[in-house]
Image (cartoon, rainbow, N blue to C red):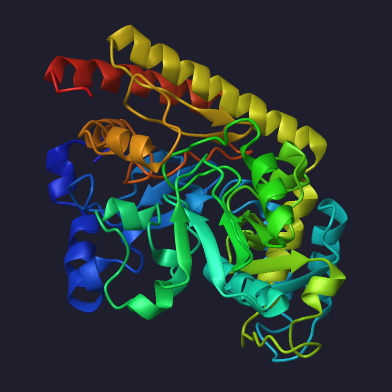
Amino acid sequence: MNPEGNSSDADMSASASKALFERATKVLPGGVNSPVRAFRSVGGTPYFVDRAEGPFVYDADGRRYIDYVQSYGPQIAGHAHPAVIDAIQQAAQRGTSYGAPTRGEVLIAEEIRARVEGIEMVRLTSSGTEAAMSAVRLARGVTGRDKIVKFAGCYHGHSDSLLVAGGSGVAQQGLAGSEGVTSGAVADTVVAPYNVIPELDESVAVVCVEPVAANMGLVAPEPEFLQGLRRACDEVGAMLLFDEVITGFRLCRGGAARWFGVQPDVWCFGKVIGGGLPVGAFGASTSIMSGLAPLGGVYQAGTLSGNPLATAAGLAVLELLTDDAYQHLESSVKSLQEGLIQAFAAAGVPAVVPRVGPLLGLFFTAHTPHDFDTASAAADNGLYPKFFHGMLRRGVAFAPGAYEAIFVSLAHGDGEIEATVQAATETAHEMAADGLPIR
């Protein structure tokens, strides 16, 4: 076995990962604790990660992969960054959870407020799902309205009212929603196509949107889409919610609101602000957030919310994200984008590699998708699994599903980008030689 990657299918069939997966299937549904980690949409057996460092993950057999999953976004500084590990270790020595307020909660809330214009107060949670669910409840409570509007292909976590027509793992499993969600739970949820401004009325409490749709591959907002949502909400008195669990503090210092120049009423965050530990947050103006208990009548709580380890890790990451860091990150992503475009063009494989700042996507199609229907057509044409396994054999790990974004970290250097492009060039020629139908 080669510890630097480039393992053969035969090696993989006898791997420690396979043995672990067989054990996992007996105690975990499907052998995983999140469907996005399963290989259902690409085939094969998941590799089990033993450790990670910088741009790399190492599987249970010691194989090294250049990693573009990066825990689906949190590891923007790279795996096991020394500053983050040190912050976690120092926090852990003081205790891991108290059931009482901590200084770290105040510091990270202040940091979020300082970075995002319009946010005056923050409530921390333990996941992005909790943040979105709670933010919607708050919007309903403050407006006194019931209906929410979301967009097909946008994923806002797995709470019942927001799961319908979700992207990410929901789409990868071939599901429109989820069994167990009652008709009543989604009766007040209106689903609209992304990049189309829906007609609103005064029954709508909140419009929820990913400002960059990063759970159906990567679909950028059309010009004036977000601005149009802002105007439409203002006209009927509805709130606009930006789900920035992915875009928050990845696009730039102030997130998507600053990037696009559109200010929502409510924000949701996650991933980056926890440095790889479980975290979520939602924020808004003082007048809106005052609707939350103990100040107002909208109840929300969490035993581990504002966990001291997560706030320490998140603060360490945010300190690393200077303007220079964002410039470096975007430069690396642009280099990868250009390299992938050249690799597919040289092999004659139709592909588009959309980019919004430091966020990157990949579709095997001749035309850039603009909504969930066009993204699904590209994601489900059978080419992504070939690409995924070809790259994995060459020591490069992308997400095991075509509906995820590509996450580059500050730790990815020129060498890793060049190696990735070389692997993509070889894989693309394999794909072309297979003669698979391209739609």
Q: Give the camera-side residue of 209 and 143.
A: 143
User: Could you tell me residue 39's position as x and y percent?
Assistant: 24, 52
Q: Quick one: quadrant of the N terminus?
A: top left
Decide: is 224 above or below 425. Answer: below
Identify the image quadrant of residue 127: bottom right
Decide: is 188 above or below 426. Answer: below
Decide: is 439 above or below 86. Answer: above
Identify the image quadrant of residue 222: top right
Q: Give the camera-side residue of 179 and 410.
A: 179
Q: Quick one: quadrant of the C terminus?
A: top left
Q: Looking at the image, which residue is at 23% across and 64% down? A: 20
Q: Looking at the image, which residue is at 45% across and 45% down? A: 193
Does residue 285 show up? yes
Q: Give the camera-side residue of 69 and 185.
A: 185
Decide: is 317 above or below 95. Answer: above
Q: Looking at the image, which residue is at 62% across and 85% down? A: 302
User: Could you tell me residue 412's position as x and y percent?
Assistant: 57, 34
Q: Is residue 430 left or right of residue 246?
A: left
User: Could you tell me residue 211's position as x and y percent?
Assistant: 61, 46
User: Could you tell me residue 74's position as x and y percent?
Assistant: 58, 54
Q: Give the camera-side residue of 7 and 368.
A: 368
Q: Residue furthest top?
A: 346
**How many marks are shown on the rendered structure?**
0
Q: Residue furthest front?
A: 201
Identify the image quadrant of residue 182: bottom left
Does residue 104 show up? no
